[in-house]
Amino acid sequence: MGLFRSVISKLKAGLTRTRQALTSGLRSLILGRRLDEALLADVEKMLLEADVGVAATRRLLEGARDDFRAGKLTRSEDLLEHLKRELKTLLGGPAVEMAQSPSGPTVILVTGINGAGKTTSIAKLAAKYRAAGKSVLLGACDTFRAGAVRQLEIWSERLGVEVVKGQQGGDPAAVAFDAAKAAAARNVDVLIIDTAGRLQTQDPLMRQLGKIRSVIGRQIPGAPHETLLVLDATTGQNALRQAEEFSRHAQVTGIFLAKLDGTAKGGIVAAIRHGTQIPVKFVGVGETPEDVEPFDADAFVEALLGE
Ligand SMILES: Nc1nc2c(ncn2[C@@H]2O[C@H](COP(=O)(O)OP(=O)(O)OP(=O)(O)O)[C@@H](O)[C@H]2O)c(=O)[nH]1
Ligand SMILES: [Mg+2]
């Protein structure tokens, strides 16, 4: 049993828009129609519209097409169950747990483009760890955007956790140094580092991320234990490209897919899973600290395609 568990009802609520578009759409498409090549083509179109992506869609329907042509899949009602099974396989088994330092603080570095949802997602993680009885410290390494430190502080006050901060415009690596030092001295369970939004194409900023990493690693052996890339689910296939690019530059260990509630294109999860090796570890389904679910393939598929 992991530290965090997935709650299907909450996931379902968060997936409302995708469910309306995809699931209701699939049901009404399939019900009362004969299973034939035309129906398979329509289902394919619907999966593509939900941002499942070309490659993942092909993979999801491959088996159905083969089985249909071999006469093994004959009833349209069975197609949905078939898709569910395929999607579960594609998304791949149980949740991938967050890494944990064997001794001393576990450090989680959070990165992503501007406005992806990094700071909000950090509040969500902090709330989760607090609820699991862990002590949490935050590092305000977004020294770039005006108001960024304050935003993190407001969350920290609400959640009852402390923040290590520096001067606006100062060196983010210096803040990372202070935060890691404080985390080690206080022996907190978890240190979560907020960073400024950056594009994967901005070399100096990507190098800065490297500097933050090495500063933390010198203070706390093995840190950062997790590098989470926050992606905005509403950006569709663009999110997939960010995942590819960021993982090339930073050693991303997991994806936090934010704003899944804000999109009818929740199929992006499948595209990311199929297109990268990085596990989706959390999904964000709203703006409050409670609106987060650890990603679990079975729970996700049930919430998405279940009744
Ligand atoms: N609906 C919804 N909104 C979200 C979610 N996560 C974040 N947001 C909203 O997205 C907006 C940007 O979130 P931030 O957490 O400030 O994003 P950020 O990546 O830290 O932004 P910068 O620091 O400016 O790069 C805010 O309005 C959040 O409330 C989510 O899961 N669902
Ligand atoms: Mg931020």
Image: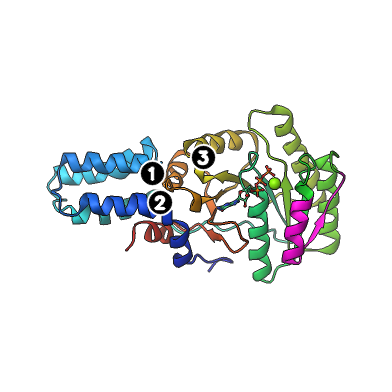
Earlier along the polypeptide chain: callout 3 or callout 1?
Answer: 1
Q: Residues within 10 Å of mark 3 (few under 14, many from 20)?
A: some
Which residue position is annotated with label 3? 235
Q: Position of residue 270 (x, y in %)?
A: 42, 46
Alpha-carbon span between mark 3 and mark 1: 12 Å
Which residue position is annotated with label 1? 50
Would you say residue 224 is visible in this rendering? yes
Type of the residue with mark 2: Thr
Residue drawn 60% across the image and 36% down it: 246
- Residue extent of the magenta highlight: 150-167
Residue drawn 42% across the image and 48% down it: 264
Q: Is residue 129 positioned above or below 43 on the image?
A: below
Alpha-carbon span between mark 2 and mark 1: 7 Å
**Label 2, ligand 1: CB separation under 8 Å:** no
Alpha-carbon span between mark 2 and mark 3: 14 Å
Would you say residue 104 is visible in this rendering? no
Q: Residues within 10 Å of mark 2 (few under 14, many from 20)?
A: many
Question: In the drawing, does residue 50 fall left or right of residue 257?
Answer: left
Earlier along the polypeptide chain: callout 2 or callout 1?
Answer: 2
Q: Position of residue 81 (x, y in %)?
A: 26, 57
Type of the residue with mark 1: Ala
Question: In the drawing, does residue 105 fall left or right of residue 178?
Answer: left
Earlier along the polypeptide chain: callout 2 or callout 3?
Answer: 2
Residue 162 image-quadrant placement: bottom right
